[in-house]
Image (cartoon, rainbow, N blue to C red):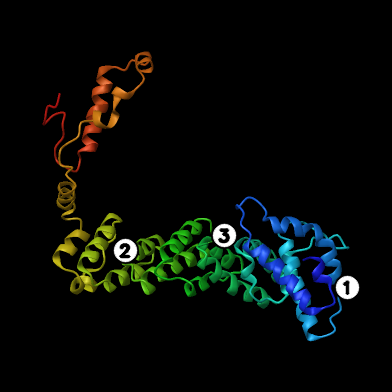
């Protein structure tokens, strides 16, 4: 098949190229090994590259064929490291940009991932030199939706961050992947380079939750994290579901945030208002405990489980009975604080 790439007959050359592409794209291998077709063809890299460098197109078909060869060379470079005559390392991206730029994703997910790392480096280099980056962004617009379609949302987000186009992620989200995307954005926001980047990432997540999918509870948590009172108020007022609104009131009360009564009284019933003011938090806690059948007070031994400790270690470290009793009393108070009763004083269990 490699020999067929160098034949004078155009149809035979194309046939050989298509056969090689079929072998590479349909080969199966684990994530840690190189597909067998690439193992074989990488031994012919030098002769393919020499033919490519010396090949002078005589027609439009030949020009298209040389572009296809450039694509093939970029694929082989995923498994080898080669340098040009000046000693510079050959990159996949350089051959992709001089290739067809058609059906790039047909070479597979690992090929696209390798290209993404090259795009990030080239983008930074072009910014430093003041060179245009449009052709790189065109590739990003191809790769980002492909990665998301392949359930590689984190790779797509990393690529968009590298080219400073993270807002474009809104064009690729749907009801099936927005949760995964938002969780990843929230995680990477903690590693932002500065405050502005941190805030812009959180605002992007907030807009996805609030505007696009109307997930008011998640939006409220992000709004509180941002610390924007406008976001907090509009999230609460926009919600029409009384149950969800009570949940929002619980979240606000736990954070010590109380909205102005003049602005929200018409949008809030008495129960929701009392929740936000923490008037009945203990009552609701008891209702929850009753629903979960947790009203029976627990003994500290249920937490300590001292009977599972190593007896030899326990004997070597003798603890005074007064300290043990104090520890049990403190533990009992904290375990049963929300129930208004406990085991050691009000109910003798042993």
Pointers 3 and 1 in contact (C-beta within 8 Å): no
Identify the mark nearer the N-term, 2 or 3.
Answer: 3
**Residue 310 picture location, percent across and down:** 36, 20
- Residue drawn at x 86%, y 75% is 55
Q: How many marks?
A: 3
Disc 3 is placed on an element classified as loop
Give the label, 1 or 2, closer to the camera: 1
User: Dots 2 and 3: beta carbons under 8 Å?
Assistant: no
Label of residue 54 in the image: 1
Q: CA distance from mark 3 to mark 1?
A: 46 Å
Q: Position of residue 317 (x, y in %)?
A: 37, 16
Q: Left of 189 or right of it: where is 343?
A: left
Judging by the rendered image, the residue that carries numbered circle 2 is: 217
Choose top left, top right, bottom left or bottom right for residue 178: bottom left
Q: Which residue is mark 3?
A: 193
Given residues 144 and 9, the one toward you in this image is 9
Closer to the camera: disc 3 or disc 1?
1
Q: Quadrant of the C terminus?
A: top left
Of callouts 3 and 1, the N-terminal one: 1
Do we see residue 98 in this rendering? no
Front residue of 12/53: it is 12
């Amino acid at each position: 098949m490699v020999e067929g790439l160098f034949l004078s007959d155009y149809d035979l050359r194309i046939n050989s190229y298509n056969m090689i592409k079929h072998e590479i794209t349909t080969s199966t291998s684990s994530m840690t090994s190189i597909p067998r077709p690439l193992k074989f063809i990488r031994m012919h890299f030098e002769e393919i590259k020499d033919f490519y460098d010396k090949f002078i197109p005589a027609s439009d078909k030949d020009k298209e064929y040389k572009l296809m060869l450039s694509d093939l060379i970029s694929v082989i470079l995923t498994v080898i490291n080669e340098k040009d005559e000046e000693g510079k390392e050959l990159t996949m991206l350089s051959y992709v940009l001089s290739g067809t730029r058609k059906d790039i994703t047909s070479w597979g997910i690992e090929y696209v991932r390798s290209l993404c790392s090259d795009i990030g480096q080239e983008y930074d280099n072009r910014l430093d030199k003041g060179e245009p980056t449009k052709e790189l962004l065109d590739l990003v617009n191809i790769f980002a939706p492909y990665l998301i379609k392949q359930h590689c949302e984190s790779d797509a987000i990393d690529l968009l961050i590298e080219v400073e186009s993270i807002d474009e992620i809104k064009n690729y989200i749907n009801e099936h992947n927005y949760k995964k995307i938002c969780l990843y954005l929230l995680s990477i926001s903690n590693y932002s380079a500065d405050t502005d980047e941190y805030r812009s990432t959180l605002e992007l997540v907030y807009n996805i939750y609030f505007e696009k999918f109307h997930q008011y509870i998640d939006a409220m948590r992000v709004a509180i994290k941002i610390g924007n009172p406008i976001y907090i108020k509009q999230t609460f007022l926009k919600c029409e579901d009384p149950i969800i609104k009570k949940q929002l009131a619980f979240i606000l009360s736990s954070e010590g945030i109380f909205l102005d009564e003049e602005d929200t009284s018409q949008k809030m019933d008495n129960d929701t208002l009392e929740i936000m003011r923490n008037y009945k938090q203990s009552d609701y806690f008891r209702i929850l405990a009753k629903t979960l059948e947790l009203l029976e007070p627990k003994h500290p031994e249920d937490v300590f489980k001292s009977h599972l400790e190593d007896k030899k270690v326990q004997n070597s470290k003798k603890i005074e009975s007064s300290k043990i009793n104090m520890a049990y009393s403190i533990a009992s108070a904290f375990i049963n604080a929300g129930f208004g009763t406990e085991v050691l004083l009000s109910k003798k269990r042993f």
